[in-house]
Amino acid sequence: MPDANRGWRGELAIDYWREDGRTLAHDRHVGPLRVLQRLYPEGPGICHHVLVHPPGGLVGGDTLDVSLELGSGSHALLTTPGAARFYRSAGPVAAQQVSARLAEGARLEWLPLETIAYRGCRARNSLRFELAPQAEMMGWDLLALGLPAAGQDFEGAGEVWQHLEWPGVWLERGHLAAADRALIASPLGLDGCSVLATLWWASGTPMSTGRRDALLEAARDCFAEHPALASRAGVSALDARLIVARVLSPRVEPAFALWRSVRQRWRAIGWDAAGDAPRLWRT
């Protein structure tokens, strides 16, 4: 996996902690990356944050670095107002990297909108998280290759490196090259789909068999309710602490709708919480 060259760098660090039943936060930023004000649409226990990157995308050499620290018992939900974009590069790699550490009993929902890899980009997209006992995380990654609706398929020299890691539990590394047509077009690869979406539930303490099976069954029920995607969706328990779901889709919107429905079911089962969507998704 290549290193990003020197370019425009944005850094954001957020610390969350629980105090008198409320999740509070303190953020620090460098460059064009920040969060809007804290929001509490579900009450004081869950802090909603919207990550904002005013330039709107990354070109070769740019780096966005997000660091999250969740204290014991805190609960944070993070999303974005629009897609992240990796634009065409003349050679240098653009990178978006996220790291999260959750203390005992903390909960994190990492729910950004899609990442779009434009034709000719060279992009690295990585996320690493660590969970203490009783901490839990729900997260997703929606990667859109090109802009097929605008007639700009992902082809030519574009490349994307994907990295998802929970040290000691889960490690995925992927290299998607536009020139690798066997991967992009083959039924054994992406089968011509332009969107690859991953959703996971991670628990710092092994789940009971009943809880794990309920989460798995809920995801499969959601697949059945989205028949256009059902044949390209799957979910499995990779470990007693981790459930991973995936789907291939020709467009972002159906995959996003499916993940929203799974999230709603998982929240109810795992946390006995409503699955209402952040207001931003409804505008």
Image (cartoon, grey):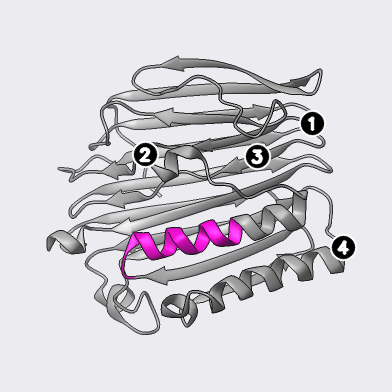
List the residue tagged with mark 1: 73
**Badge 1 or badge 3: first in the primary sequence:** 1
List the residue tagged with mark 3: 108
Q: Is residue 153 visible?
A: no
Residue 206 position by quadrant: bottom right
Cα gap from disc 1 to disc 3, whole angstroms: 10 Å
Q: Amino acid at mark 4?
A: Ser
Q: Residues within 10 Å of mark 1 (few under 14, many from 20)?
A: many
Task: Report the front residue among 173 and 2.
Answer: 173
Residue 64, compared with residue 2, is above or below; it is: above
**Badge 2 or badge 4: first in the primary sequence:** 2
Q: Position of residue 118 (x, y in %)?
A: 22, 51
The quarter of the rendered structure image containing the C terminus is top left
Disc 3 is placed on an element classified as strand
Q: Which mark is residue 208?
A: 4
Question: Is residue 174 covered in magenta?
Answer: no
Cα gap from disc 4 to disc 3, whole angstroms: 20 Å
Residue 194, compared with residue 264, is above or below; it is: below
* Residue at (40, 83) in percent of width and height: 188
Q: Position of residue 147 (x, y in %)?
A: 21, 58
